[in-house]
Image (cartoon, rainbow, N blue to C red):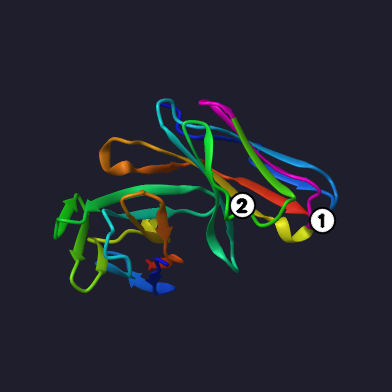
Amino acid sequence: GEDVEQSLFLSVREGDSSVINCTYTDSSSTYLYWYKQEPGAGLQLLTYIFSNMDMKQDQRLTVLLNKKDKHLSLRIADTQTGDSAIYFCAEGNAGNMLTFGGGTRLMVKP
Amino acid sequence: DAGVIQSPRHEVTEMGQEVTLRCKPISGHDYLFWYRQTMMRGLELLIYFNNNVPIDDSGMPEDRFSAKMPNASFSTLKIQPSEPRDSAVYFCASRDRGAGNTIYFGEGSWLTVV
């Protein structure tokens, strides 16, 4: 079955860039997604990328996709304390049922 | 749009009691999902509906769990009888067939069974 892996934890200093990485196994993935979960809240869609794209930029967020290596990353520029949260990577195939990674907890130190 | 609306936001109940969680998906979305999130198991898909019809309930843990979607704007997830190990956050989500087939989540129902 499909599998999505993420590192558990990332700590950065305020103002630095954060890079959260994700690997997946399903080569038929159509879309790949990044969600953010703040404490006590649901998952909020940050951005998504279509599988035939290499990169997508949206303000401070840059998504890079290496389809050959099945590797997805999320870069947050000028990371702020408000970016502290759990970030989930997810992949969707033609049936579009999403498979989520376990989440990466981002801690931003002042 | 108000987004996916779930109720109750928090519930504490005693073991053996029936629990009913409710969800109103975003209008016009054709898929509805129920997920469960725990520290140990992460995010698990329990069941999903397409056009009000259950498509895959293989993630439902046991017969104590049931879900219905009587119409396009309402779904319930019921646990009867509840057990302490059912304590988790239960998320409802709905899918937009448009941009990226994106799934939008509700704020979750935080269930504690004591």
The answer to whether residue B65 is magenta is no
The answer to whether the residues at label 2 and label 1 have Cβ atoms under 8 Å apart is no
Q: Quadrant of residue B88?
A: bottom right
> For the point 60% across and 48% down, which residue is it?
B90
Whether residue A78 sits left or right of residue A35 in the image: it is: left
Residue tagged 1: B114
Whether residue B54 sits left or right of residue A87 in the image: it is: right
The answer to whether residue B76 is magenta is yes
Looking at the picture, does residue B110 appear above or below residue A104? above
The reply to whether residue A26 is visible in this rendering is yes
Residues at marks 2 and 1, CA–CA distance in whole angstroms: 15 Å
Q: Position of residue B4 (x, y in %)?
A: 49, 35
Q: Amino acid at mark 2?
A: Val
| Mark 1 surroundings within 10 Å by alpha-carbon count, few (fewer than 14), some (14 through 19), many (20 or more) | some
Residue tagged 2: B89
Q: Secondary structure at mark 2?
A: strand
> For the point 32% across and 65% down, which residue is it?
A26
| Mark 2 surroundings within 10 Å by alpha-carbon count, few (fewer than 14), some (14 through 19), many (20 or more) | many
Q: Secondary structure at mark 1?
A: loop
Q: Amino acid at mark 1?
A: Val
Q: Earlier in the sequence, mark 2 or mark 1?
A: 2
Q: Position of residue B111 (x, y in %)?
A: 69, 49
Please report the bounds of the magenta region as a residue range.
B70-83
Count of residue discs: 2
